[in-house]
Amino acid sequence: MNNSVYVYKGDEIARYGFGDPHPFGTDRHDVFHKELAAAELDSVHYAHPRRASVDDLALFHTAGYIDRVSKLSAQGTGFLDEGDTPAVKGIFDAASDVVGSVLSAVDIIMHGEARRAFVPIAGLHHAGRDHAAGFCVFNDCGIAAEYLRKEYRVQRIAYVDIDAHHGDGVFYGFENDPDLIFADIHEDGRYLYPGTGAATETGTGKARGTKLNIPLAPGAGDAEFRAAWPRVEEYLNRARPEFILFQCGADSLAGDPITHLCFTEAAHAEAAAALCRIADQHCGGRIIGTGGGGYNRHNIARAWTRVVESFVAAG
């Protein structure tokens, strides 16, 4: 087993964004990679993005939605949702490259070339099966879960999210699926988009009681995060997943311009380290980190680098 951590880098995923003055700009990729290079980590292997096929996208998204994104992307005008996600020219290809990079990471890990991987411009957790939302066009994590099942017969997949925003696209996409193990620490939806993720939302039907939502009050910091985190570990250890998808949005750090949590980068480092331990115990070490949100550039550079540092330290 190769102990390298594969980190994705390339213009293809860097161009996922919506231009100035939109908060999700195309500079986020390079800000992170500059910080990561300065860390001079051993065992980091840089991997190149690849493009997802329409068939890959259709593992999670409806054909009608995929076609709509393709057409609006070619036109380059209007919005893919109610006003947060512009239909900029070329966004279909850029979003497909984000998805393809996560699927490439799945393949690398499942083929035994590595146990850990990180894709910075990914974790687009608001996109639903039939719609865009909250800067997210295609839901790479939702697609990755379906891909793991189709290509590798991996059924029990844990999705862990510490972005300030609730991962509603993943939650509702698998709300009645007891084998999608969902744990999300986020700012209380009464104060922040998308307004979902109450503690009472635990899944529906045969999946009732299998989803863990932990909303935190605005202003919550590392102390509140550390108080909540053991519930995530207990939940994962009880569920015994076969693969972990980690959405580590940096908009939960203090100083983000559009959210109100006050974590430091230590929360991301500690969560990543803990998830590696759980992955080693239950999943053969298999974990993918995705960057998710974050609109303070210093925060995303440091938080994501700390995640990669934790992946490297875990071996």
Image (spheres, grey):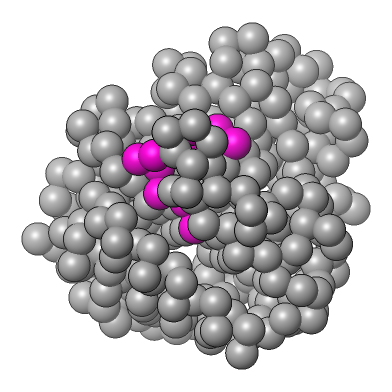
- Find residue 277 and report its horizontal and vertical position in percent: 27, 74
Q: Does the magenta stretch include residue 180?
A: yes
Instruction: Find out whether residue 149 is within the magenta segment.
Output: no
- Above or below, comparing residue 100 to residue 239 in the picture: above
Q: Which residue is drawn at 36% across and 76% down?
A: 274
Residue 194 seen by the camera: yes
> Is residue 299 found left or right of 38 in the rendered image?
right
**Left or right: where 302 falls relative to 262:** left
Q: Hey, which quadrant is residue 220 in on the image? A: bottom right
* Left or right for 96, reference 233: right
Q: In this view, does 156 lie above or below 71?
A: below
- Residue 178 vs residue 112, the one in the foreground: 178
For image coordinates 61% across by 90% down, the residue present is 223
Q: Give the range drawn in magenta.
A: 172-183
Residue 12's x, y, as percent? Answer: 54, 41
Q: Where is residue 245 in the image (x, y as percent from the top left)?
A: 40, 53
The residue drawn where x is 74% and y is 43% is 135
Position of the N terminus by quadrant: bottom left
Left/right placement of residue 6 relative to residue 307 reads left
In the displayed image of the protein, which residue is found farthest to the bottom?
223
Residue furthest out toward the left = 1
**125 is higher (above) or lower (below) than 251:** above
Q: Nearer the viewer, residue 204 or 298?
A: 204
Q: Is residue 5 above or below residue 240?
A: below
Q: What residue do we see at 79% from left, 81% from top? A: 219
If the image is split into quadrants, where does the C terminus sit?
Answer: bottom left
Q: Where is residue 264 in the image (x, y as percent from the top left)?
A: 63, 85
Q: From this viewpoint, is residue 42 visible?
A: no
